DNA sequence: TCTAGATGGTCTGAATTTGAATCATTCTGA
DNA sequence: TCAGAATGATTCAAATTCAGACCATCTAGA
């Protein structure tokens, strides 16, 4: 703790730079595939994935925003885009009239099914297959802990 | 390789989701600190860091773009912003009149010195200190390999 | 010496993201 | 029951990002 503001040690620096670069490049690659094969941005894709996984294929806007980790206003924009494309539709919520359901349409499910295999292929290609099983394990543990800590702040 | 488009295994999925979430949340935290303590965005900060580390405190625009991993037009915009803030200045290049030097000013160096300790503190807090030394080692190896593969494509 | 093609940077207009302000609805406690 | 705080979502303007067009300069080969 005494060296809080000092330069990182070489191994620490190496890990940090690798993390930054990998995050950047992997995301770039994922984005490219989604755009090419389905005309979707990464956040849009994640919205579809979350909705697909949710009970009834729908979620309230604010829950969705939390899950996808985007701001409310950004989600509003993205859902509007997806709605225009016919992949999602909005419905008023009965029990709480402030909130809004975002619901996956049949077309949305189809679009998701269309890009998802390619998406998985990319994830395998750029991340999974480059790592040993032990590394995959450590990555899950370590970064899972990092994410958890940041989530409940 | 035969399962290229199939769902990921649980451990693979866990690693992938942790990676995504961690990248997202860590970047958010870093961004917040840089903005708060120095009025800088993360890419702007990285530009200053690269220039600081470069011989003569300057780099050609295209080299800089490659290093920071941003598009040319994005770098043009960011350097313009930094120039307005007085942290960087542009100079024509003698030997190749197409290219432009981006050079760190004294003010720029000072600004960097001002935010950097806080930046390091955040990196330590959210990443380094959450990991064991072994995990740091593995992260550097594994993600370094991931990044390298993507860089030379 | 030309010329076609590459390279380095900027510019432009459209798309996206941000953050604050706003609006309606729901919750809370006196 | 009612005022004030909280919550869910959208809107707006400003800032940023993107992709491609564009311009100038350099390089290589005929």
Image: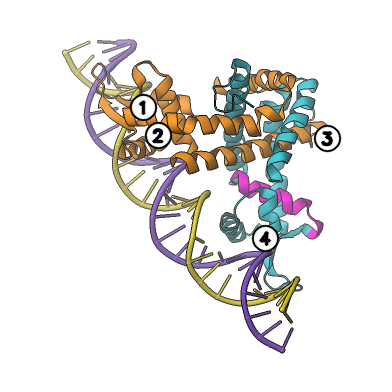
Chain colours: A orange, B cyan, C purple, D yellow
Task: Measure the alpha-carbon separation of dots 2 and 1.
Answer: 8 Å
Splitting the image into 4 quarters, where does residue B126 fall?
top right
Report which residue position mark 3 lands on: A10
Can residue A47 be seen in this snapshot? Answer: no
Residue D4: x and y in percent read 31, 23
Is residue B50 within the magenta segment?
Answer: yes
Report which residue position mark 2 lands on: A75
Vertical placement of A79 versus D25: above or below?
above
Tell me, for residue B67, which label it has, or none: none
Badges 3 and 2, same chain: yes
Region of the chain picked out in magenta, as a range: B40-56
Residue B71: x and y in percent read 59, 53
Report which residue position mark 1 lands on: A61
Marks 1 and 2: in contact by CB < 8 Å? yes
Q: Does B149 sit left or right of A152 as displayed?
A: right
Q: Earlier in the sequence, mark 3 or mark 2?
A: 3
Chain at numbered mark 3: A
- Dominant secondary structure (helix, strand or loop) of the stretch shown in magenta: helix
Report which residue position mark 4 lands on: B61
């Amino acid at each position: 703790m005494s060296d809080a503001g000092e330069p990182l040690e070489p191994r620490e620096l190496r890990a940090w730079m690798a993390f930054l670069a990998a995050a950047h490049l992997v995301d770039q690659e994922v984005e490219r595939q989604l755009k090419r094969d389905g005309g979707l941005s990464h956040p849009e894709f994640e919205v579809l994935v979350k909705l697909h996984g949710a009970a009834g294929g729908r979620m309230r806007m604010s829950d969705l925003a939390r899950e996808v980790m985007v701001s409310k206003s950004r989600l509003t924009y993205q859902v509007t885009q997806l709605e225009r494309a016919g992949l999602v539709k909005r419905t008023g919520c009965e029990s709480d009239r402030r909130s809004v359901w975002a619901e996956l349409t049949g077309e949305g499910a189809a679009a998701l099914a269309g890009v998802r295999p390619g998406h998985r292929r990319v994830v395998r290609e750029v991340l999974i297959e480059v790592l040993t099983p032990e590394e995959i394990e450590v990555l899950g543990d370590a970064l899972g802990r990092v994410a958890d800590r940041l989530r409940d702040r």
